[in-house]
Image (cartoon, grey):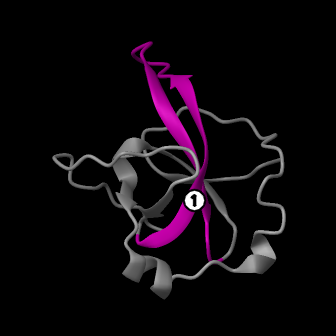
Amino acid sequence: MILKNRDKSKTTMVRNGSIQKLNGRVGKIIAKVSRKNPLTGQYRDIYIFKLHYNGEYYISPNDFFETATKEDRKNDPRNENYWRNEYSMIVGRIYYTERARQWFNV
């Protein structure tokens, strides 16, 4: 999946539990963590995002999220087979990233 950078002039408020879009797919913010940039030493918020249609996880900074509209939610419905364990524990290592990327909770 190719992930494109969004327009930097727009800001999106992202919080735990909110429904967002990442690269055109709808999903839910599962968690927010703060990670240190190894090059600059500055901390940045990284979000764990779970796709509605197949339950895959992604990690991404705030820059790549868009607010999902009702139309977006209708066109990209939640597949309940992948959401049975919605509140399962996050056990994988969450690392610093500059762009959105797939993440595995293992």
- Above or below residue 50? Residue 88 is above
Judge by depth and name the residue closer to the eye, 59 or 90.
Answer: 90
Q: Residue furthest bottom?
A: 75
- Above or below residue 100? Residue 71 is below
Q: Residue at x 38, y 82 (%)?
A: 71
Q: Residue at x 61, y 72 (%)?
A: 52
Judge by depth and name the residue closer to the eye, 80 or 57.
Answer: 80
Q: Is residue 36 magenta?
A: yes
- Above or below residue 51? Residue 40 is above
Q: Residue at x 56, y 45 (%)?
A: 16
Q: Residues within 10 Å of mark 1 (few under 14, many from 20)?
A: many
- Above or below residue 74? Residue 31 is above
Left or right, 54 with reference to 88? left
Q: Quadrant of residue 72?
A: bottom left
Q: Is residue 50 magenta?
A: yes
Q: Residue at x 34, y 61 (%)?
A: 4
Q: Residue 9: percent from the left, percent from the top?
A: 16, 46
Residue bounds of the magenta highlight: 24-53
Q: Which residue is mark 1?
A: 28
